[in-house]
Amino acid sequence: MDWKRFGELTQLPGVPGAEGQVREYLQREIGRLTDETVEDRLGSLFGVQRGQSESPRVMVAGHMDEVGFMVTRITDKGFLKFQTLGGWWGQVMLAQRVEVITRERRRIPGVIGSVPPHLLNEERRKKPVDVTEMFIDIGAEHREQVEEWGIHPGDAIVPVCPVVELEGGNRLMTKAVDNRFGCALSLELLEDLQDHAHPNTVYAGATVQEEVGLRGAVTAAQRVKPDVFFAVDVGPAGDTPGVKNGFGEVGKGVVIRLFDRSMIPLSGMRRFLVETAEEEGIPYQFFVSQGGTDAGAVHKTGTGVPSAAVGICARYIHSHAAIVDRGDIAHAKRFLTAVVHRLDEKQLGRILGR
C-alpha cells in the first residue's frame, strides 16, 4: 500500500460539485498506470486495464467527494454563512477548523462559530446549536475585505485535519477517509493489474457527488456499461462506547455489506465475496447500514448490474477527523485484487444464479 499517496489524497480539497483537485491527482496517477481512460461530463474518471477477455466488464469505484460545506452568504461584518454538503451532525461541527477554497485555489483558514454559551440564557444553553445558527469566522473585518480576499458565494469549504499516525503506528487519523480510501484502492488495483493476467476488463477509478445522492455513479455507469460493479467505500464503525450490537469493528478486517438503504446484494454475490475472503485467508466482517453507497445507484442502471459494497469501517466518518486501521486497508487491497482475479464469465454466471 502506498501510504504517501493515501495521505496526499485525504488532504486534497474536494466537496461535492468541486472535486477538481482530486480529479487532477487521479488523472495523473491513472495516466502512469494505463493508457486508456473513460470519463463522463460530471467528472467521474476511470482507468482501464484489459485482461484476457473483453467480458465481464468489471467496474470498481471509490468516490472523490468528501463531506464539506459551501459559502452561501457574506455578512456585512465579514462572517460567512454556509450550506452543508453531505450528511453532517451539527454537534460535531462547532469550533472546528475549516478552509475556504477560492476560485484561485487559495486556502483561507477559518473556524465554525456560534453565539457563545456565556451570552445565552439557561434554556438556550441546554439545546444543541442548529446548523442554521452557525457561521464561519475567517478573521475579516467587513464584507469588502472578504471579497478582496477572493471569497464568493458558492466557494467550497473543507474540514482541516492533517494525517496523524496514532500511538503504536497501526492507526491513522485524517480527514476525508470517506472516501479517498476508495480512490486510493482503485489506483492500487490498477497498479496490481499492470503485470498480472486477469480474466476480464477492469474499469477502476472514482465517481463524483456521491455524498449528495450518488449522482456521479449514475452517469459513470451509463458511460462504462459494466457487467458487475463494486463500490469501495467506508462505513461507520460500531465499536465505540455507547454503541450496542453495532456492525463494524476497526481492526477486524474487510467489510462486506449485507444490506443498506440503497441496495441488497444478490445472494450469489454475497457467496462469491465470502468464499473469496475465506479461501484467501482474509479477515472479514458483515455490515448493515442505514446509509448508502454508489452501488445503490449503479445496480439499477441498464438491465441491472449485480453490485456490492466492500471496504473498511472507520470511526467518526462525516466529521473532521476519522480513524482507520492500516491492517484493514491492507486486507481490503488484497481482497479487491483477489475478487477481480476470480471474476470470469463462469463466476459471473454463478453470481447471477445461472
Image (cartoon, rainbow, N blue to C red):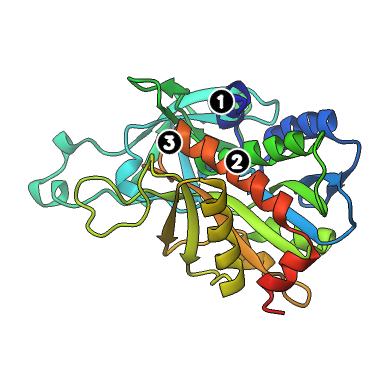
Q: Residue at x 57, y 47 (%)?
A: 280
Q: Circle 2 sits on which residue?
A: 334
- Where residue 248 is drawn, which disc sits there? none
Q: Secondary structure at mark 2?
A: helix
Identify which amino acid the numbered label 2 is placed on. Answer: Arg
Quadrant location, the N terminus:
top right
The reply to whether discs 3 and 2 touch (Cβ–Cβ < 8 Å) is no
Residue topped by disc 3: 324
Label 2 to label 1: alpha-carbon separation? 19 Å
Q: Position of residue 154 (x, y in %)?
A: 61, 43
Q: Residue at x 48, y 44 (%)?
A: 82
Residue 244 appears left or right of 227: left
List x then y, in percent, for residue 37.
87, 43
Q: Residue at x 39, y 44 (%)?
A: 252
Residue ID for mark 1 = 7
How many C-alpha atoms fall within 10 Å of the one at disc 3: few (<14), some, or many (≥20)?
many
The amino acid pointed to by label 1 is Gly
Q: Position of residue 10 (x, y in %)?
A: 56, 31
Pick whichever of labels 2 and 1 is earlier in the sequence.
1
Quarter holding residue 228: bottom right
**Which tag is nearer the camera, tag 3 or tag 2?**
2
* Number of numbered discs overlaid on the protein picture: 3
> Seen in the image, is 312 located left or right of residue 296?
left
The label nearer to you, 2 versus 1, is 2
Decide if residue 293 is in sight here.
Answer: no
> Could you say whether the residue bearing mark 1 is in a helix, strand or loop?
helix
Mark 1, other Cα within 10 Å: few <14 / some 14–19 / many ≥20: many
Q: Disc 3 to disc 2, how far (Cα)?
A: 17 Å
Q: Nearer the viewer, residue 353 or 218?
A: 353
